[in-house]
Image: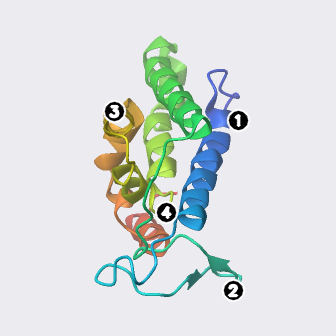
Amino acid sequence: AMRPSCPFGMDRVGEHTVTLQEWITHVHEVSPVTTSASPRFYRSRTSENKSGTEMAVTDDSFPYGVTLTSGAEQALRGLNYCVHMAYQKQFQDEDEHKLDHAGDVDSIVESVARIPSLMKTILLIEDDDDRRWVMSTPIIRRVMLCRFSVANNDVALEEKINLGIR
């Protein structure tokens, strides 16, 4: 049977994760740490994605002055809503549809956890109140516990394949 579309915003999860990815890319492009600013933590290089284009976001770049934009904040609020509604949906469905939504929360969390450099960028948010708020959100608390939040995408994908998760 085909799963009905989710009325609580599952389709929006992709849009919210793209918004967070764009925020992270912007942060790394606008405020890159130069070699002279932090020679111990930064090697002057860029990484290349599979298509061969350079990416500003690397594991060894540590931008300064990171601010939480209103777009990133709205994306986090939207993801919190999606997680909340996915969780509620598991208990509201009739017994026959309960399993249709059993993995929705995990799917949302994993899709957010797979955003490259998300946790690093959050930890680099300069404003203490903003950083505290982000770290306290339900989606980020769940992401912190997800094994994919600390692995690069290739490792995370390989791990998912090895575990037989689709």
Q: Looking at the picture, does residue 154 appear above or below residue 14?
A: below
Q: Residues within 10 Å of mark 3 (few under 14, many from 20)?
A: few
Residue depicted at 42% across the width and 60% down the height = 64
Tell me which label, 4 or 1, sits earlier in the chain. 1
Camera-side residue of 126 and 146:
126
Quadrant assignment for the N terminus: top right
Of tags 4 and 3, the one toward the viewer is 3
Return the mark for residue 129: 3
Residue depicted at 59% across the width and 51% down the height = 23
Q: Which residue is mark 2?
A: 52
Tell me which label, 3 or 2, sits earlier in the chain. 2
What whole-number distance in Å separates the C-alpha atoms at marks 1 and 3?
A: 44 Å
Q: Residues within 10 Å of mark 4 (few under 14, many from 20)?
A: many
Camera-side residue of 129 and 154:
129
Question: Which of the 4 image quadrants contains residue 14?
Answer: top right
The answer to whether the residues at label 4 and label 1 have Cβ atoms under 8 Å apart is no
Tell me which label, 1 or 3, sits earlier in the chain. 1
What whole-number distance in Å separates the C-alpha atoms at marks 4 and 3?
A: 23 Å
Q: Which residue is mark 1?
A: 2
What whole-number distance in Å separates the C-alpha atoms at marks 1 and 2?
A: 38 Å
Tell me which label, 1 or 2, sits earlier in the chain. 1
Q: Amino acid at mark 3?
A: Asp
Q: Amino acid at mark 1?
A: Met
